[in-house]
Image (cartoon, helix red, strand yellow):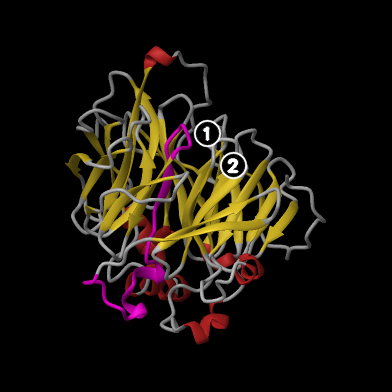
């Protein structure tokens, strides 16, 4: 599937390794009965993560402070003019006037810690779930961290360093860098293949500029998929969707790939692109776009593309375990909907306030979206397309991920 000539990528300087705040617990074999499946909700502007039930009523279990070292980090930033410039740039740009304290999160295999990327602090940290204290901290290259992915065995995380065209791969238990690789401009989404052999990274280019008219698309930078060997971190293939979109008759669409979802057999990739209210189906083996689905636009959506959050129109895409339904977060159109994969027919448009992400519940029955504009997460039944539940969370929820915590855990002690 991934056979191709090896691409040449620019060498990227690696930053200093993880700083240990106390010895990190090594992963140990944990019985499934000792752990409880949960959903982690990253409250980006709060700097907290809500832990909620992974299915059913999605009731909240606890809240974690993801920035216990805030005073120390701010002191370092304010003493460094360059760091301060980027910190304020994030606040006034992609942060929409707010600091971005929590982006992506995963729990360690033993369920004892949660690892998170913190864009405004340009780092990745591990938080002890029992105490709320830092286990370790890894500063990324450049000045902003972003989306992450976890390996199928849960032992490694891949994190995008937005301003450095770099993805770091870290040991999830120690925070030590195992490798890194170069990408296009502003790496964003990362995915490990199910067999753990490859990592896919999607670079989205310069989303913080106001040059959003299609005639200025060339200013958005180098945007492509980078596929690397997940053990050597050497490039295997790059895919620029520009020529594929042109061949499909959609030269009007951006080639900046946003959230994506693989089919269960990983033969097909579904993805969103900047400025588009819909998604694209791409057959990996034939290297061809096969279908493009345009979803309804909300008449109330401002047509001025510069008002759309970070070049998004729709941002959030997931697929049910059976591979028969897709769930789409229509971010700027303020709805979410379940789409039949065979026919691409959408179901009911479920009103939602700036839905920013879509994932799958622990039991696979529901799509769970984060409503950044309403400070809640909402579950939508894959079978009916109807809203099943909503739960209040913190300020500006974004990423929602499945994880595991100790079965009797009710929150950090401090």
Is residue 142 in the magenta section? no
- For the question of whether residue 60 can be seen, the reply is no
Within 10 angstroms of label 2, few (less than 14), some, or many (20 or more) residues? many
What residue appears at the point 47 percent right and 53 percent down from the top-left corner?
Answer: 147
Q: Secondary structure at mark 2?
A: strand
Is residue 312 in the magenta section? yes
Describe residue 150's horizontal placement relative to residue 36 as left or right: right
Residues shaded magenta: 299-324
The label shown at residue 158 is none
- For the question of whether residue 235 can be seen, the reply is yes
- Out of 107 and 227, give the one closest to the viewer: 227
- The residue that disc 1 covers is 173
Image height check: is 284 above or below 54?
A: below
**Mark 1 or mark 2, which is nearer the start of the sequence?**
1
What residue appears at the point 66 percent right and 50 percent down from the top-left corner?
Answer: 284
Q: Could you tell me residue 378's position as x and y percent?
A: 24, 44
């Amino acid at each position: 599937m991934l056979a191709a000539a090896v691409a040449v990528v620019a060498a990227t300087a690696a930053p200093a390794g993880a700083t240990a705040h106390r010895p990190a617990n090594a992963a140990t074999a944990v019985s499934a009965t000792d752990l409880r499946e949960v959903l982690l909700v990253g409250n980006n502007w709060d700097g907290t993560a809500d832990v909620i039930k992974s299915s059913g009523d999605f009731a909240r279990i606890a809240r974690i402070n993801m920035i216990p070292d805030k005073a120390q980090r701010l002191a370092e930033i304010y003493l460094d003019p360059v760091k301060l410039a980027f910190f304020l740039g994030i606040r006034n740009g992609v942060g929409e006037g707010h600091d971005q304290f929590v982006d992506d999160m995963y729990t360690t295999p033993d369920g004892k810690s949660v690892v998170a990327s913190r864009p405004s602090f340009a780092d990745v940290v591990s938080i002890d779930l029992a105490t709320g204290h830092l286990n370790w901290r890894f500063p990324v290259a450049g000045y902003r961290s972003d989306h992450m992915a976890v390996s199928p065995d849960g032992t490694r995380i891949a994190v995008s360093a937005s301003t450095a065209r770099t993805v770091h791969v870290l040991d999830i238990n120690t925070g030590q860098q195992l490798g890194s690789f170069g990408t296009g401009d502003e790496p964003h989404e990362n995915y490990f293949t199910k067999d753990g052999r490859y990592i896919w990274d999607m670079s989205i280019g310069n989303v913080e500029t106001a040059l959003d008219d299609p005639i200025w698309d060339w200013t958005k930078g180098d945007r492509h998929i980078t596929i690397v060997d997940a053990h050597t971190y050497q490039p295997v293939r790059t895919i620029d969707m520009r020529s594929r979109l042109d061949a499909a008759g959609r030269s009007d669409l951006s080639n900046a790939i946003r959230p994506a979802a693989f089919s269960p057999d990983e033969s097909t990739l579904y993805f969103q692109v900047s400025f588009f209210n819909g998604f694209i189906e791409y057959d990996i083996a034939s290297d061809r776009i096969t279908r493009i689905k345009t979803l309804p636009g909300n008449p109330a959506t401002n047509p001025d593309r510069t008002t759309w959050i970070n070049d998004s129109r729709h941002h959030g895409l997931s697929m049910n375990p059976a591979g028969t339904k897709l769930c789409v977060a229509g971010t700027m159109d303020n709805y979410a909907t379940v789409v039949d994969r065979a026919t691409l027919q959408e179901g009911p448009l479920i009103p939602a306030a700036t839905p920013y992400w879509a994932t799958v519940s622990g039991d696979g029955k529901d799509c769970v979206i984060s409503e950044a504009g309403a400070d809640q997460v909402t579950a939508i039944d894959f079978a009916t397309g109807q809203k099943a539940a909503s739960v209040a969370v913190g300020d500006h929820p974004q990423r929602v991920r499945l994880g595991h915590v100790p079965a009797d855990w009710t929150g950090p002690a401090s």
